[in-house]
Amino acid sequence: MPAWPATEADALAEQHRLRALVDPTGPALSDGALVAGVDVAYDEERDLVVAAAVLVDFTSLETVEETTAAGQVSFPYVPGLLAFRELPPVLDALAALRHRPDLVLCDGYGLAHPRRLGLASHLGVLTGLRTAGVAKTPFTFTYDHPAPARGDWSPLVDGAEVVGRALRTQAGVKPVFVSVGHRIGLAEASDATLALARKYRLPETTRRADSLCRRALAERQLSQ
DNA sequence: GCGACAG
DNA sequence: ATCTTGTCGC
């Protein structure tokens, strides 16, 4: 396994290498599938980063398992290279899960990326897990506003390419931006996102992982 | 040409 | 991402 890239040039080369290994197709989730949400929180002062993974039952929406992992920040925030900043602790948190997720939902993009290898795709190729990205803002892509009902969507476009969907998860609320990560199709990833966002704009997996990594970071800050 | 740009 | 009070609503 190659060392984690330390420079932007190495990171770009690594993206190029991994991009060829992405599989942007795959079936819908089965009843009772286990979906993991992952997210990270930062302490800029101490270069500390904490990741959380929360495993949710796709059908009941119950939390099945939670893990966290902490580390030193090892890469700056560079638009288009987010994976190199966020993935090290995320990989650790996922490795600590006792169950194997049937899907990992990331806070960010997959195929919707300048070089078609966002955080979610990158994670999928590294782990072999099925992944998809659900982002809160449209990055540099364009879309027409979807109709106002829950479940309505419109294509997320980069030039002439459809790279994802602007999906309305709550009536009258601004959409989220879904893109394929690895081993799942866009329609299937969108269906999973909608099913996990019954009550709020963001899927429960993302909401719970976000809340957990913030809590875990706050606890570390108290004890150190 | 320059800057902005997921989190 | 993070800096941040009170406030509206279920």
Image (cartoon, coloured by chain):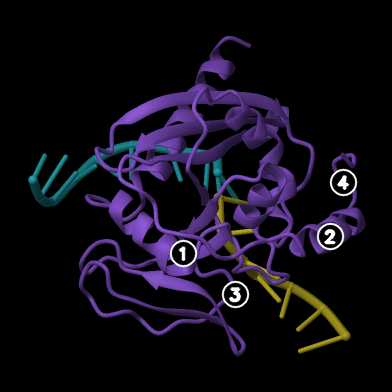
Chain colours: A purple, B yellow, C cyan
Alpha carbons under labels 3 and 4: distance apart: 25 Å
Mark with earlier residue (1, 2) = 2
Q: Are marks 1 and 3 in contact (CB under 8 Å)?
A: no
Q: Position of residue A85 (x, y in %)?
A: 72, 44
Question: Can residue A167 be seen in this snapshot?
Answer: yes
Alpha carbons under labels 1 and 3: distance apart: 14 Å
User: What is the chain letter for disc 1?
Assistant: A
Quadrant of residue A108 in the image? Answer: bottom right
Q: Position of residue A43 (x, y in %)?
A: 63, 32
Type of amino acid under label 2? Arg
In the rendered structure, find residue A178 and report the number of the disc placed on it. Answer: 1
Q: Are marks 2 and 3 on the same chain?
A: yes
Q: Are marks 4 and 1 on the same chain?
A: yes
Residue ID for mark 4: A5
Type of amino acid under label 4? Pro
| As drawn, B4 above or below A95 | below
Mark with earlier residue (1, 3) = 3
**Residue at 49% across, 27% down:** A99
Q: Secondary structure at mark 1?
A: strand
User: What is the chain letter for disc 3?
Assistant: A
Residue ID for mark 2: A17
Q: Position of residue A62 (x, y in %)?
A: 28, 32
